[in-house]
């Protein structure tokens, strides 16, 4: 167990944590803004329903189909890569590669943002209009309302959504594996490498040890999410 959190194995865990934290942070911010925009579209039910429907589909779209779609779009010979190259923008020269860290971040955001939108919609819907009216009656601007009232009330849902997105990204496997052809340093991909028997003598249990540490991280993240979810539901009642 201790060897699994040292050297290159620790690097794989930290790489996964960094990827998960970045995609969860970006997904939480953008997804919350989308949820607020969706609630403001209450008078346009068709548009809101379309947005919610797309979010529900995109949040569950991952794995090999999603990886193939991005490779076909932004890969070395991808459609958008060639279109940008035609106008003088070479993604390779800019250091972008779909299988690198930045590429995986972009792909993960495709399902992280819709998931956060779905998580935050009930919380944003739960903000009573009387709160905004009361703030306006004492001269508060919309920015002051969100800074002093809206964001504090939404903070449990925001933090809970962040932890959910973190766990979602940390446990992802197929998408990153397909994008990198198995060469990614993500801990989930490394576990597959060891469980397939690609180990040196005396280290056959490393895959199980890495999986155990991965479970520890997941339990901590999901415990925090469930606690914050109960807290956010309390004030909405």
Image (spheres, grey):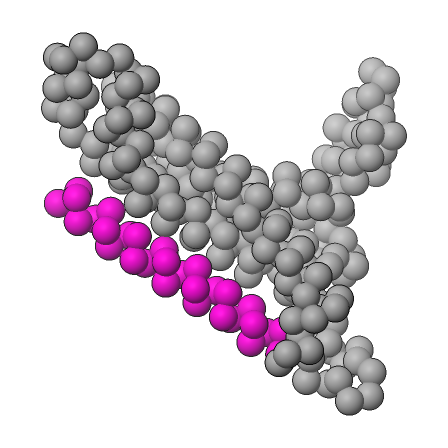
Tell me the magenta residue range.
209-237
Q: Quadrant of residue 156?
A: top left
Q: Is residue 174 left or right of residue 125?
A: right
Q: Nearer the viewer, residue 41 or 164?
A: 164
The dominant secondary structure in magenta is helix
Could you tell me which residue is drawn at 64 percent across and 62 percent down? 13
Note whether residue 145 is visible.
yes
Task: Say if 60 sits above or below 195 in the image.
Answer: above
For this orientation, the residue located farthest to the top is: 139
| Percent coordinates x, y for residue 158 in the rendering | 36, 42
Quarter holding the N terminus? bottom right
Q: Is residue 172 left or right of residue 226?
A: right
| Percent coordinates x, y for residue 53 in the rendering | 40, 37
Is residue 227 a member of the stretch shown in magenta?
A: yes
Quarter holding the C terminus? top left
Q: Quadrant of residue 81?
A: top right
Q: How many marks?
A: 0
| Percent coordinates x, y for residue 16 in the rendering | 63, 56
Could you tell me which residue is drawn at 79 percent across and 80 percent down? 199
Q: Nearer the viewer, residue 40 or 237?
A: 237
Could you tell me which residue is drawn at 32 percent across and 44 percent down? 157
Note whether residue 48 is visible.
no
Q: Quadrant of residue 102?
A: top right
Task: Say if 87 sits above or below 115 in the image.
Answer: above
Could you tell me which residue is drawn at 75 percent across and 28 percent down? 80
């Amino acid at each position: 167990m201790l060897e699994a959190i040292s050297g290159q194995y620790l690097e794989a865990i930290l790489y996964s944590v960094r990827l998960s934290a970045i995609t969860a942070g970006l997904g939480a911010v953008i997804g919350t803004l989308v949820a607020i925009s969706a609630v403001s579209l209450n008078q346009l039910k068709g548009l809101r329903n379309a947005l919610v429907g797309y979010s529900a589909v995109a949040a569950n779209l991952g794995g090999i189909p999603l990886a193939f779609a991005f490779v076909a779009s932004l890969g070395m010979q991808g459609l958008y890569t060639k279109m940008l190259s035609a106008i003088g923008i070479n993604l390779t020269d800019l250091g972008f590669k779909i299988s690198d860290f930045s590429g995986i971040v972009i792909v993960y955001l495709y399902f992280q943002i819709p998931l956060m939108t779905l998580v935050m919609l009930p919380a944003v819907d739960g903000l009573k209009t009387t709160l905004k009216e009361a703030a306006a009656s004492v001269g508060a601007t919309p920015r002051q309302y969100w800074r002093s009232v809206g964001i504090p009330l939404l903070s449990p849902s925001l933090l809970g959504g962040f932890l959910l997105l973190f766990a979602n990204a940390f446990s992802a496997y197929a998408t990153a594996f397909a994008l990198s052809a198995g060469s990614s340093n993500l801990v989930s991909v490394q576990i597959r490498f060891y469980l397939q028997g690609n180990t040196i003598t005396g280290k056959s249990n490393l895959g199980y040890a890495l999986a155990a540490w991965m479970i520890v991280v997941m339990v901590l993240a999901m415990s925090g999410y469930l606690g914050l979810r109960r807290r956010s539901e309390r004030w909405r009642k």
